[in-house]
Amino acid sequence: MNYQLGIITINYYSEDLLGNFIDSLRSQSFDNWCLVVVNNGSNADIAELIKSKNDSRLFSIESGGNPGYASANNIGFDFLKEKNLINNKSFLCFSNPDIVLEDKDVIIKLISGMQKHKADFIGPKIINQDGSFMLPHLKPGNYLKTFFHLGNNGLADRVLGYNKKLKKMEEAVEVFMLNGSFFIAGFKAFEQAGGFDSNTFLYYEEEIFFRKAKESGLKAVYEPSVNVKHFNSATVHALLGSAGKKRTVYNSELYLIKNILKANAFLVFLFRLERKMEYWLIKLTGIFRKK
């Protein structure tokens, strides 16, 4: 059976939130979907969790370790294709397991929005527990934005008022990049953009993917009138720690700067030096906190 929407989510020790995400999907007014959970190295029995839901639209597969966000999403996409669960007229949804769809019409509103705006990708307003937003990007990143941590919905953005314009938007607008925590894509558009770049393990997958999409002439739309909730899973921080997370982000940033932005050797050196200082500052701060 072909489904109109194939949903992919990656589980990495997020079992406590995954069940809530699945339940919110099952409450949607749009029901012609299937979900594949790609288990990315977690020890939990995801197959048993899926079985307990007693829903033929739910599937689980093992990624064979922990290849990272980009590779696991590509694995999920390949599974949906190989099992003939979707076809080239279907839509895809990429979602984190810590997302909850409180509005029962989220999916139907977004698919309708894609058709209305002739978009290849569409994303809702993603609202964190503290009321802040996980925002898209209006323009591609560059070396300075990456160097100064701009556009990642973090402290630098809040202090400088970055993306203030997006926070106040109420109507749909074309953007460069959607947040990877939750967005919908056309099957053919995702294939045309070449899927996610598996050279990144975690972080900056969206930046790289939507660069390829833009180069292919594809259109992304942000629809702030549709909301989903993000429950801020602390899994990555808990498993890696602050220093480990920083190192993981650094590796993706370095790949972006060297291979996508094509920065020269001097700029790469400056970036390495600054990030090394950041890393050791975080590590030393952690040591002092333990004492």
Image (cartoon, rainbow, N blue to C red):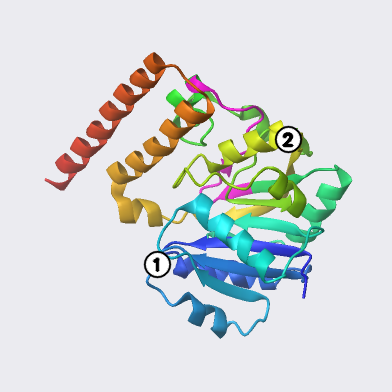
SS at mark 2?
A: loop
Q: Is residue 141 visible?
A: yes
Q: Is residue 200 left or right of residue 215?
A: left
Q: Is residue 226 left or right of residue 66?
A: right
Judged from the image, the secondary structure of the residue bearing numbered disc 1 is: loop
Q: Position of residue 233 (x, y in %)?
A: 45, 56
Amino acid type, label 1: Ser
As drawn, is 48 to the left or to the right of 279?
Answer: right
Q: Which residues are magenta?
A: 126-143
Residue depicted at x 72% and y 70%? 84
| Residue with the mark numbered 2 | 216
Disc 2 from disc 1: Cα separation: 35 Å
Q: Amino acid at mark 2?
A: Ser
Tell me which residue sits at (35%, 51%) in the image. Answer: 237
The image shows residue 97 at horizontal and vertical percentages of: 54, 61
Q: Is residue 277 above or below residue 270?
A: below
Image coordinates of residue 29 in percent, x first then y, are: 78, 69
- Give residue 264's quadrant in the image: top left
Q: Label 1 belongs to which residue?
A: 42
Report the disc number at residue 104.
Answer: none
Ranked by sequence position, the earlier of labels 2 and 1 is: 1
